[in-house]
Image: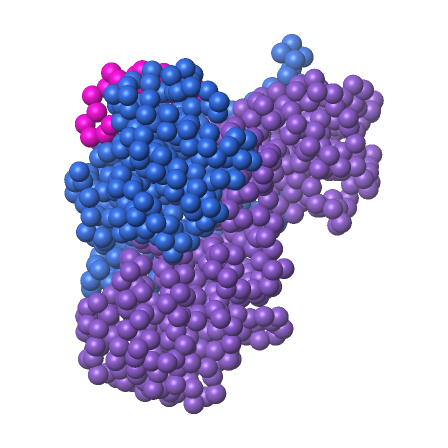
Chain colours: A purple, B blue
Amino acid sequence: MPQVELYDTTLRDGAQMEGLSFSLEDKLKIARKLDELGMHYIEGGYPGSNPKDAEFFQRAREIKWQNARIAAFGSTRKAGGKAETDPNLKALLDGGTSVITMVGKSHLRHVTDILETTAEENLAMVRDSIAYVASQGREAFFDAEHFFDGFYFDPDYALSVIRAADRAGATRIILCDTNGGMVTGRLVEAIRAVRAATSVPLGIHVHNDADLAVANSLAAVEAGVLQVQGCLNGYGERTGNANLASVIANLQLKLDTPVITPAQLAKLTESSNYVAEIANMTAPNNQPYVGVSAFAHKGGLHVAAMMKRDDSYQHIDPALVGNEKRVLVSELSGQRNITAKLAEQGVDIALSPAEARAILEQVKAQEAKGYQYEGAEASFELLVRRSQPGYRAPFELEDFLIIERRRWAPDADKNDIIAEAVVHVKVGDQKLQTAGEGNGPVNALDGAVRKALLEFYPQLSVIKLVDYKVRILDSGAGTGAHVRVLIESTDGTRYWRTVGSSTDIIEASWLALADCLEWWLLNAG
Amino acid sequence: MPQVELYDTTLRDGAQMEGLSFSLEDKLKIARKLDELGMHYIEGGYPGSNPKDAEFFQRAREIKWQNARIAAFGSTRKAGGKAETDPNLKALLDGGTSVITMVGKSHLRHVTDILETTAEENLAMVRDSIAYVASQGREAFFDAEHFFDGFYFDPDYALSVIRAADRAGATRIILCDTNGGMVTGRLVEAIRAVRAATSVPLGIHVHNDADLAVANSLAAVEAGVLQVQGCLNGYGERTGNANLASVIANLQLKLDTPVITPAQLAKLTESSNYVAEIANMTAPNNQPYVGVSAFAHKGGLHVAAMMKRDDSYQHIDPALVGNEKRVLVSELSGQRNITAKLAEQGVDIALSPAEARAILEQVKAQEAKGYQYEGAEASFELLVRRSQPGYRAPFELEDFLIIERRRWAPDADKNDIIAEAVVHVKVGDQKLQTAGEGNGPVNALDGAVRKALLEFYPQLSVIKLVDYKVRILDSGAGTGAHVRVLIESTDGTRYWRTVGSSTDIIEASWLALADCLEWWLLNAG
């Protein structure tokens, strides 16, 4: 048994977060990434409540997991029923996982007022459900919901629920701060009382409502708890669950309690970003350990000190968690950033200090217009190339016309939308006019431009767009706001990213698309 | 002396955050709001390093502060110099504040390797600077930079710096976890050693690099520290400073340590939002206590329990911090989420359980198409109203035509873009055709539709869009991806949010715009 085991519930409790909703494919992708990262348990969902979750467990059985065991989650049997015939327990068993986690009440007032049953019947529900699941050859974990609030409401009853789970054969008893309001001292005091009442290994499951979820998880481990439950990136209902990215890094780097291998820890940042991407949530820049700003230095004095010693203003070496140091562009350090950045990208252009300064000014002017080159290296490279004397672009888009019509189609009994684009493209001295259509104006424009360019550069047909992101910059300006479009493209082997900005989403998209094609023609075509 | 005093450094340390930059007017607005909230000290900036900060102190002297004392921040005198002639100390004194906070080194390796001076000279710098500032009739606070790392590197030297500050007349000695990497146990151990070495009231200043800044601030108070330094919303370099919103709420509501009045605490959410607005930072939905999701309930079982008791899934009454409970509607919802949501929105439609179930199914079907009603209550209300027999929409958009042309304008030496829209709108039996133009297709469509509707509903002219967000849902599908548009609108008094989804950004925008206007006509027009 490891010193501490990790139980990730991103796919179940994490999905309770406002604005988050996972498709079945999303769930499978995230589970694979969590497994790679070294999670010991991955809670896949709630098969009794949701057909999508039931399907997840079917698909999960076909996957060979490297590190994790998959757990299904559900409630103890209904009040007044029998475990053997409970439809929810049946769905849990049908999930086919070797671990089943059951949640039950441990707060007496919740038993009487919410469940509307008796103290005795609740104990029987816990006992019967765990014993039945164990009798079916599965490991039974018991989540004691509202345990801490329940302990301070009626300690004897809360502990009697724990003892019932113990006697029925639970192999883990997880203490939940369901409402997330516990301060650390009271949490630890309650854990001590539980440890005196049972020898079953304990787990901790806390929410972040008091901004203490990570601290409380660590304090629980120090108080002898084996299992930490939480979500990567701290997703979850209300203010979220304990953020496992922070918990893992702290255990491993600060509390001398390794939970994953150093190689897995070095994938922490990438894993956090991947899950955020699939979840379609913006990753907070200032997220500890894994955020893009976590090792970013802005103050002039700090940057000067960092040039003497890397640990002056960093608590760890960022490489340990797969992150990196960044010096933010300022008037003093900027010029060096330009040349360092080109070298980093392998672009063979030697700039004089004066040229580098001129490019820095241009970057700043473009950023004031809404561009951002941090996530669009290919557009940055083009900006530098275009500044060189004698640069000749492989093509030019002379102009475009977009027509889009939405009208009622009585035969189909729905609205029909047609978007068409006409473009004029110039390559060397040759001009070409083409038209295209699509399921939106940008799609139509994309089609028309490619049709034109393929006549000159048939090799362009390998390029595919893999990502298309739109960000409204000054969203308070309503439909007249500035728009930034970021595009990621691939030719099957390499990936590159480009940016466009305008008050018009069509133009912004066009600028990013044009950079995508131009960069590839210069570098591979 | 209060049990605990609050020292806000949003305007100085907070401004080190990536992406954050305050104008002078921003700083004055935020300082006024922090004063209203009941902060005891507001650190205004670094007058020695920055002319904007020097001007701030000039302006601050003309303001009558209700609760706060303004503090100026700077370094101790330069190595080898004299306090009396140090330009930085002069700038600090010129700031005219009654409190001056000076930062100095307490980590021996930083003295030798970064400052490149001797252990003795650093002690003299601390001593001279504090004594000089105190001799000028000001209160001298001493920030011991890197104190905790310094204590574990060389405890004798770190404590000798503290003693030097004490003897020179510092009225507060603030222990800084500058790199933010301390775990709570080690932090408390070091505080105990300092308390044995000095009787000067202590402060705590921690950063969030290990995701423990709030927990460490509370632990420091429990260990006897008087002053907590931090930033509202946890702004600050890298991962930020301790979030004072969470610290205040925890002290007051959890640790029986009032720091502001209950009326001020009830302004915590508004103050947090105001500062985020001025700082032009997106406020995280899941921020503890003050986030828009902090008391939002999504799971069907949770909502059912909340209808029995409000404290089932809330750790405090949200009104205490000026926040409110919200019910979310999503695929995880039960039928009761639908009726609870309508009641919360004050919509007077009584649904039978069968009707509520049918609407829930419709919500799920719409979410599968890319809609999301969690952030778009007005669109949800319309979905319910449209399901009622006899509902008649105040208008219908029959069809639209968009024409956009980008072409080279040789006279202007730039590309000209013209976007025009033609719409057919039906109100009752009347039909109207209008045209509009704008700086993009959505802006043009918006203009044309409003022009048409104003003929029928002149009162619509008060409506303004305050926010327009676009999210690409399946970004891997490139320019053919599904797009979700969220719009927030206001008529000057109320705010409402609507949603539209399509593969076509123009149609998605139109659907959200139409809901915006239709909702207002039903509820206010």
Residue at 59% across, 44% down: A324
- In this view, the residue in front, A521 or A303, is A303
In the image, is A98 to the left or to the right of A158?
right
The quarter holding residue B11 reads top left
- Whether residue A239 is visible here, answered yes or no, is no
Residue at 78% across, 41% down: A460
- Quadrant assignment for the C terminus of chain B: top left
In the displayed structure, A191 sits above or below A525; it is below
Determine the residue located farthest toward the top in the rendered image: B411
Q: Position of residue B207 (x, y in %)?
A: 42, 43
A496 inside magenta stretch? no
Q: Position of residue B375 (x, y in %)?
A: 37, 46
The quarter holding residue B357 reads bottom left
Q: Position of residue A48 (x, y in %)?
A: 41, 74
Residue at 51% across, 24% down: B439
- In this view, the residue in front, B122 or A221, is B122
Magenta span covers which residues? B49-70
In the displayed structure, B11 sits above or below B295; it is above
Q: Position of residue A387 (x, y in %)?
A: 72, 21
